[in-house]
Structure formats: structure tokens, C-alpha cells
């Protein structure tokens, strides 16, 4: 299960808060620029009022000091300059401090980049400077200008308070929005996903417990509902397959024990039949070969079943293998070398290399060659030159190895049930396990085993990757 800070709900809440705050930052910059412009316009407006007073009074020196100080203090300014018709008039505090580093703010420049840049400049660079606010003093004459000189600190403090309030409000909005969305998403998404994940973890620990199979939410037709239905179906199928597998395993164990005892009994009978075959009684001589053949076939059947049950499921360990050499070795185990009638033609060219498990691939060759030899032996003298041919065609990524014979071919029943254990045998009393095992080995190597239909004989192609 995820930790307390790594769950899906925490990630959703954090994402929502981050997105809302990011949007608020984008909104904050122009709104802060408007706030700053409004603040500056208020101070400039006082300067314009002072300029009109100067227009009405011909002699600035005649103005009472109390009136000029009141005008300047109302604007928070240290000085106001009115420029008209090439002349300048100055109002300043009686004990005005010397201006520090001055920054000019032209109120006639109202484009977004300038105003937003001014906000950032005030917040990060301002505080201990003097600002010079410049604006038009007369709407009818743009040549008349009013300048207000004042410290920047009050503007910066107002902007900081505005920014703090905006952040607090944005954070509250983000938290409330995240909470509402979380409650909504939690009900329709997070809770069902948590239920699914907890069910899968619990079912994985005890897949044979039918009570852990999830129950799909009724009347839910969205993706979560489909997922619940498919998960319930999959868990039900796994439960059924596991029970069948356990039953088959128990049955297979019992059959293996019975088959082992049967093979031992048949082996003893085989030894007795061999002794009976040496008797001189004509009836015994006539019936003994049938008895020996039947017992040999029963012993072979029992042994093949035991071999199939003991077949290892260990993954192959591929190494580079010379195919021609491996074919010769497999032919010896299949009883072809030195055979009286059946001949092997190894037409695999020198240097054909595949990466495969030598023991497992040799087992494939042995099974195919042994089946071909037995099919040719059943023809007897009907086939003048019984031959098994091994060949290989190397491509860029695969090698196709063919094992073919010129025998009678496969009967229809065998073709219909190829590679099916206990059903795909071409001869009476066969188990069909050889082809089933050969196909499993080929597929475990990333290749395939296929029967190639042809007019005469039988041919199987083994396709293996070269790398």
C-alpha cells in the first residue's frame, strides 16, 4: 500500500493547489500593476490639484506655508513640480530631505509590460529610493506636466500588503477548491481505485479464497465499472483454474504412482515373456512374438507417460550450437546410426549456428527422428530406400531446420490432433507426447514447430532465432 504522502489523493490535492496558485500568480501580476497605477494616480491627482492652485495664484511665494505643506503631506510628497509653457514652478516641504536615488515613473506609459515590470522593480529593487511621478497636468494641453517627488517606501509597503492579502486569499480559495474537488473525485475515482488495489493485493495472497473475489458495483457503466467487472471475471477464472490445476495435480500424482507400479509389473512380465519365447513348443513360438510386442508397447507407453510427467520446466540456457553436429548426435540417440534399413542424410551445411539449449534442442531432434524411423519401419519392404533427411536454411534473423522422411505420411486423425498430448500419435498405441514436448521446447526458445504438408512423406520445420 502507498505511504501517507504518496497516495493518489495527496497527489491530486497537491496538483490542484499548485495549479490554482500558478493561475493566481498569472492573475496577480496584472492586478498588482493596476493597484500600483491606481496608487500612483492618487498621488499624481494631488499634484494636479496643486498645479491648479499655482495657476490661480500668480506669485507662488505668496502662498501660505501651511497650505503648501498640507498639499504635499496629503500626497505623501516631498516636492511637486508644475511645468508649463517652458516654465517650472516648485512646491516643496519646508524641511525637505535631500532626494536619494531617484526613479522616474511616467504615468503616460500604460502598456502591460511597462506596468508589470514596474511592479517587479518596486517589489525587488525598491524601498530606499525616491520616485518621480510624471503625468499630464492639463487634459487639454499635453505639454503641461506635473511631477511628484516622494519616497518609494510607502508604495512598496502597500504593494507588499496587497501581495500578502492576495496570497492568503488565493491559498484559501485553492484549499477550498481542492477540498471540494477531492471529495468529489474521491467518491467517484479514488475510493473505487483504492478498493480495487486492496482487493488485488488481498487476492494475490490467497487466490483460492472465493470470498476475496471482488463484487462489481451494480449499474456502473464507466471505465471503473468495466474494470471491476473484468477483474471479477478474471479472479473467478483464476479461482476455477487453480482448483482444476490442484485436482489435476492430485490426479496426476496418483496416475504417476499407478503408472510406476504398472511399469514395474510389465517389466517383470517382459522378462518372463523373453524366457517363454525360448521354448520349443510350436504354439509358444507362434504366440510369443505377439506377447513380447504387446508387453514392449505397454512398457514404452508407461515410460513415456512418466517422462512427460517429469519433464522439467526450467527455462532454456541458450549457447551457440553447431546444428549439423547436434543432428548427428541426436541421430545416434534416435537409433539411426548403424540402422539396417533406414538411412540418415544430414544436409545441414557446416557453420549453421543457432543459440539454444543443446540438451533441449537435441530432445526435439530425437523425438522427430524417432517418429520418422518408426514410421519408415512399419513400411517394411514397401519402401525400397527409407530415408530421413535433415536440412537447414539460415536467414537474417531465423534458422529453419527441417526433419523430413519419405515414408507413408501422417494419417488424417494424427494431422487433426498434432501436438496434442495422448491424441497426436500417428501409430497405434502411441501417446503423441513427443511432438507436444518438442513444440513446447521450440516455443520456449522463442521459435516454433510446424508440420509442412507435402505429397509424400512427413516434414516438420523448426524455426529458431539466430540471436
Image: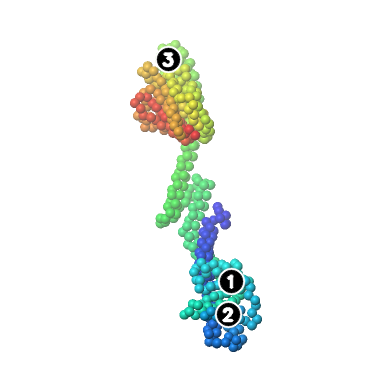
Task: Report the Cα–Cα distance between label 3 and label 1.
Answer: 129 Å
The residue drawn where x is 53% and y is 31% is: 319
Whichever of labels 3 and 1 marks the residue nearer the N terminus, that label is 1
Q: Position of residue 145 (x, y in %)?
A: 53, 78
In the foreground, 153 or 211: 153
Q: Residues within 10 Å of mark 3 (few under 14, many from 20)?
A: some
Front: mark 3 or 1: 1
Q: Residues within 10 Å of mark 1 (few under 14, many from 20)?
A: some
Mark 2, residue position: 80
Q: Which mark is residue 284?
A: 3
Answer yes or no: is residue 369 visible: no
The residue drawn where x is 48% and y is 23% is: 328
Q: Identify the secondary structure beneath mark 2.
A: strand
The residue drawn where x is 45% and y is 43% is: 240
Q: Identify the secondary structure beneath mark 3.
A: helix
Whichever of labels 2 and 3 marks the residue nearer the N terminus, that label is 2
Q: Is residue 43 above or below residue 208?
A: below
Mark 1, residue position: 103
Q: Position of residue 32 (x, y in %)?
A: 53, 70
Q: Is residue 126 above or below residue 224?
A: below
The residue drawn where x is 45% and y is 18% is: 339
Q: Identify the secondary structure beneath mark 1.
A: strand
Horizontal side of residue 406 vs 333, given as left or right: left
Horizontal side of residue 68 vs 340, given as left or right: right
In the foreground, 80 or 356: 80
Horizontal side of residue 405 vs 320, given as left or right: left
Amino acid at each position: 500500500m502507498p505511504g501517507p504522502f504518496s497516495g493518489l489523493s495527496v497527489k491530486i490535492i497537491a496538483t490542484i493547489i499548485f495549479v490554482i496558485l500558478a493561475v493566481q500568480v498569472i492573475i496577480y501580476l496584472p492586478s498588482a500593476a493596476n493597484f500600483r497605477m491606481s496608487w500612483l494616480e492618487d498621488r499624481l491627482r494631488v499634484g494636479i490639484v496643486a498645479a491648479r492652485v499655482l495657476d490661480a495664484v500668480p506669485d507662488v511665494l505668496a502662498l501660505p506655508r501651511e497650505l503648501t505643506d498640507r498639499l504635499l503631506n496629503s500626497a505623501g510628497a516631498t516636492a511637486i513640480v508644475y511645468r508649463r509653457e517652458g516654465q517650472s514652478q516648485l512646491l516643496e516641504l519646508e524641511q525637505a530631505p535631500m532626494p536619494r536615488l531617484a526613479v522616474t515613473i511616467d504615468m503616460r506609459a500604460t502598456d502591460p509590460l511597462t506596468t508589470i515590470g514596474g511592479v517587479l522593480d518596486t517589489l525587488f529593487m525598491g524601498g530606499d529610493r525616491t520616485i518621480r511621478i510624471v503625468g499630464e497636468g492639463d487634459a487639454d494641453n499635453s505639454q503641461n506636466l506635473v511631477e511628484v517627488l516622494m519616497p518609494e517606501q510607502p508604495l512598496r509597503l502597500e504593494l507588499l500588503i496587497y501581495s500578502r492579502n492576495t496570497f492568503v486569499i488565493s491559498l484559501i480559495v485553492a484549499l477550498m477548491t481542492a477540498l471540494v474537488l477531492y471529495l468529489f473525485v474521491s467518491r467517484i475515482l479514488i475510493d473505487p481505485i483504492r478498493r480495487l488495489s486492496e482487493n488485488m493485493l488481498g487476492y494475490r495472497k490467497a487466490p483460492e479464497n472465493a470470498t476475496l473475489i471482488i463484487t462489481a458495483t451494480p449499474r456502473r457503466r464507466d471505465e471503473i465499472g468495466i474494470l471491476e467487472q473484468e477483474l471479477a471475471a478474471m479472479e473467478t477464472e483464476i479461482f476455477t483454474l487453480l482448483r482444476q490445476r490442484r485436482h489435476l495435480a492430485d490426479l496426476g500424482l496418483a496416475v504417476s504412482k499407478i503408472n510406476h507400479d504398472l511399469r514395474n509389473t510389465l517389466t517383470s512380465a517382459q522378462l518372463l515373456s523373453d524366457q517363454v519365447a525360448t521354448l520349443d513348443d510350436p504354439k509358444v513360438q507362434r504366440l510369443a512374438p505377439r506377447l513380447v510386442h504387446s508387453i514392449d508397447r505397454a512398457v514404452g507407453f508407461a515410460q513415456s507417460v512418466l517422462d512427460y510427467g517429469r519433464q522439467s520446466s526450467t527455462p532454456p540456457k541458450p549457447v551457440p550450437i553447431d546444428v549439423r553436429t547436434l543432428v548427428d548426435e541426436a541421430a545416434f540417440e534416435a537409433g539411426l546410426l548403424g540402422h539396417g534399413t533406414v538411412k540418415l542424410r544430414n544436409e545441414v551445411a557446416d557453420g549453421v549456428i543457432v543459440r539454444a539449449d543443446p540438451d533441449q534442442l537435441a530432445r526435439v531432434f530425437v523425438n522427430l527422428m524417432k517418429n520418422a524411423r518408426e514410421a519408415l519401419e512399419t513400411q517394411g519392404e514397401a519402401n525400397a530406400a527409407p530415408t530421413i533427411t535433415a536440412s537447414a536454411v539460415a536467414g537474417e534473423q531465423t534458422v529453419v531446420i527441417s526433419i523430413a522422411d519419405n515414408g507413408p505420411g501422417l494419417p488424417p486423425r494424427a494431422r487433426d490432433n498434432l501436438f496434442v498430448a495422448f491424441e497426436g500419435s500417428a501409430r497405434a498405441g502411441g501417446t503423441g507426447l513427443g511432438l507436444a514436448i518438442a513444440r513446447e521446447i521450440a516455443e520456449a526458445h522463442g521459435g516454433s514447430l510446424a508440420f509442412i504438408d507435402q505429397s509424400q512423406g512427413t516434414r516438420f520445420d523448426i524455426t529458431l532465432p539466430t540471436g
